[in-house]
Image: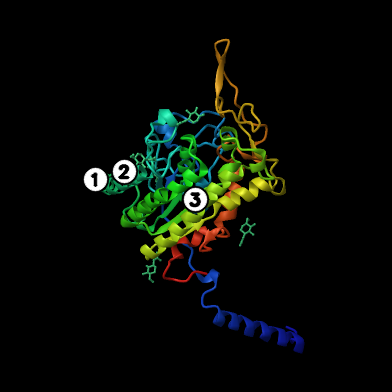
Amino acid sequence: MEALTEKQRQMVSWVAISTTLALLLVPCPVSCERQCNFPAIFNFGDSNSDTGAISAAFEQAPPPNGITFFHNPAGRFSDGRLVIDFIAKSFGLPYLSAYLDSVGSNFSTGANFATAGSTVRPQNTTRSQSGYSPISLDVQFEQFSGFKSRSKLVRNAICGVFKNLLPKEEYFSEALYTFDIGQNDLTAGLKLNLTTEQVKAYIPDVLGQFSNVIKNVYGEGGRSFWIHNTGPLGCLPYTLDRYPVSAAQIDEFGCAKPFNEMAQYFNSKLKKTVEQLRIELPKAAIVYVDVYTAKYTLITHAQKYGFDKGVIACCGHGGKYNFNNGARCGASKMVNGKKVVIAKSCKDPSVRILWDGIHYTEAANNWVFQQIANGSFSDPPMSLTRVCHGNASIPYH
Ligand SMILES: *[C@@H]1O[C@H](CO)[C@@H](O)[C@H](O)[C@H]1NC(C)=O
Ligand SMILES: *[C@@H]1O[C@H](CO)[C@@H](O)[C@H](O)[C@H]1NC(C)=O
Ligand SMILES: *[C@@H]1O[C@H](CO)[C@@H](O)[C@H](O)[C@H]1NC(C)=O
Ligand SMILES: *[C@@H]1O[C@H](CO)[C@@H](O)[C@H](O)[C@H]1NC(C)=O
Ligand SMILES: *[C@@H]1O[C@H](CO)[C@@H](O)[C@H](O)[C@H]1NC(C)=O
């Protein structure tokens, strides 16, 4: 081997010294922290993360939902996977079965309590009157709590056929708990003809009830929480079509400003609620995730990120935004005694952001997942794989 020149020798020792210094100065660089090894995920929410509950309990999501990935509706309001599916996949876990789905479900690595149309607060209207799910967040918690206690009993039952279908007892404290709910609490007020100011006035009540559920899950042993804020409601064809605003209230990207402001108001209060929860639940790691900004960035820069349109739905039938409340995605009519789908998918859902006017396409969900997974939209700035370390009493990196 050739002898090192003086210059090379200087270089080698400089690298060695600076590496040593860096290790001394940074107590624990991000890379030395262990990745969380979540054995299970329990999810709570609305249609943004429903993987089959409403389809099991009330009515099935019709085709062409699921057309891209599952090749059948698969209980999701999308052409494919949801953000929660990408989260599960990233941990090498199977896609979550809906707790209410009695056919083919395997809950050994988690369960999904989210249902399409869920609100945080129980509504005073029935599902047939207003479309909101009776399985509000408090009910989802009741289901979770029963699921936890019954899992223990049933797993330990003598013949043990459920051993491989239900989570181990310790998974409930080791699991990742994910939440994506709030959007329907906002639209519920709009549906009652309340003004955005009147909706804002009840947000503290919504968040008080949200906070109680987090505390209850903590009481059941939950320690790692990943909480999505609510998306840009004013950019959804559903909102734009159902609650028209004046031209002056539409932003340069076609979104309704008053509803986005309302969503952001909700989010600012949610962030404060999470900060308070960190104080009250010192052993929990609670991460607030700004999904709003990820989604709004995508919708307002669609082409930059390889998508074709911002606020236009892929699957629909007519209307300015390809959204028609009387003929939503999958709607059909009888033609000469045959059922014909009239609200169909656009040609290429992989380049569209919004699927049915309310929900996002698989491509958009994947994009949002990629953005939020590394922690760039998290507070504290934790990536998904390090949530378990985001402890109020331990400084994070
Ligand atoms: C339902 O009605 C009760 C009693 O009037 C009220 O306290 C509650 O806030 C109402 N809930 C909603 C979501 O409006
Ligand atoms: C349920 O899923 C787990 C984890 O993927 C697997 O180990 C188990 O064998 C499955 N149970 C059954 C009955 O297939
Ligand atoms: C809200 O206003 C619309 C239009 O004026 C009306 O048709 C509807 O009945 C109202 N809804 C409620 C719950 O008052
Ligand atoms: C949070 O920090 C406290 C104090 O250091 C520790 O006892 C607890 O186990 C930590 N919780 C998590 C989830 O890391
Ligand atoms: C996070 O991931 C996104 C998408 O891959 C990337 O654009 C962004 O730069 C990443 N941010 C950080 C802080 O690594």
Q: Given the current orientation, which residue lies at the most extreme bottom position?
A: 6
Q: Earlier in the sequence, mark 1 or mark 2?
A: 1
Task: Residue at 47% x, 44% y: name it.
Answer: 199
Q: Nearer the viewer, mark 3 or mark 2?
A: 3
Q: CA distance from mark 3 to mark 2?
A: 41 Å
Q: Position of residue 78 (x, y in %)?
A: 55, 37
Q: Which residue is denoted by mark 2 in the rendering?
A: 162
**Secondary element type, mark 3:** helix
Q: Position of residue 270 (x, y in %)?
A: 47, 54
Horizontally, residue 240 falls left or right of residue 117, namely right
Is 152 drawn above or below residue 78 in the view shown?
A: below
**Is any part of residue 314 visible from this angle?**
yes
Q: Position of residue 319 (x, y in %)?
A: 64, 28
Q: Nearer the viewer, mark 3 or mark 1?
A: 3
Q: Amino acid at mark 3?
A: Phe
Q: Position of residue 101 (x, y in %)?
A: 39, 36
Q: Nearer the viewer, residue 94 or 392?
A: 392
Q: Which residue is denoted by mark 3 in the rendering?
A: 266
